[in-house]
Amino acid sequence: MAFDPTFYYYRPTNVFAAHGYGPVLLAGAEMLELLKTHGATINDSAMQFDGGPRRPQ
């Protein structure tokens, strides 16, 4: 972190930088895919995955 705004103004950017909204959205997409493919139960303090792929019914 810098206290000088000039540091951020002239700082080079990178499309692969891992900060901002992007990593949160990517992690959310991975969680949705995990919930679709693996069973999960929720108790009062955690979400627990059964470990195996969910079989179509």
Image: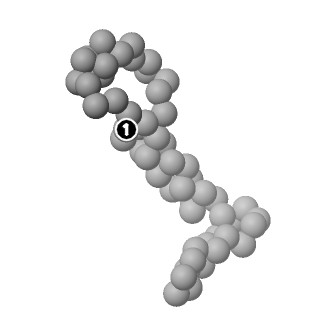
Q: Residue placed at 24% from the left, 18% from the top?
A: 6
Q: Which residue is mark 1?
A: 20
In the image, what residue occupies the spot 49% across and 24% down?
Answer: 16
Outermost residue toward the right? Answer: 52
Left of 44 or right of it: where is 51? right
Can you give x and y, in whole percent of width and height, for residue 33 in the image?
56, 53
Of the 4 image quadrants, the one containing the N terminus is top left
Residue furthest front in the image = 3
> Residue 43 sits in which quadrant?
bottom right
The percent position of residue 36, horizontal first and vertical second, equals 57, 60
Instruction: Please tell me which residue is depicted at 43% across the width and 21% down the height of the picture.
Output: 15
Q: Is residue 38 above or below residue 40?
A: above
Residue 13 sits in quarter = top left
Residue 54 point in image, percent of width and height? 69, 65
Pick the residue in front: 25 or 1.
1
Numbered disc 1: secondary structure: loop
Amino acid type indicated by mark 1: Gly
Q: Residue at x 28, y 31 (%)?
A: 3
Type of colouring: one colour
Q: Is 15 positioned to the left or the right of 36 in the image? A: left
| 15, 49: nearer the viewer | 15
Provide residue 28's location: percent of width, then percent of height. Answer: 47, 51
Q: Name above or below for residue 9 compared with residue 17.
A: above
Q: Is residue 26 left or right of residue 36?
A: left
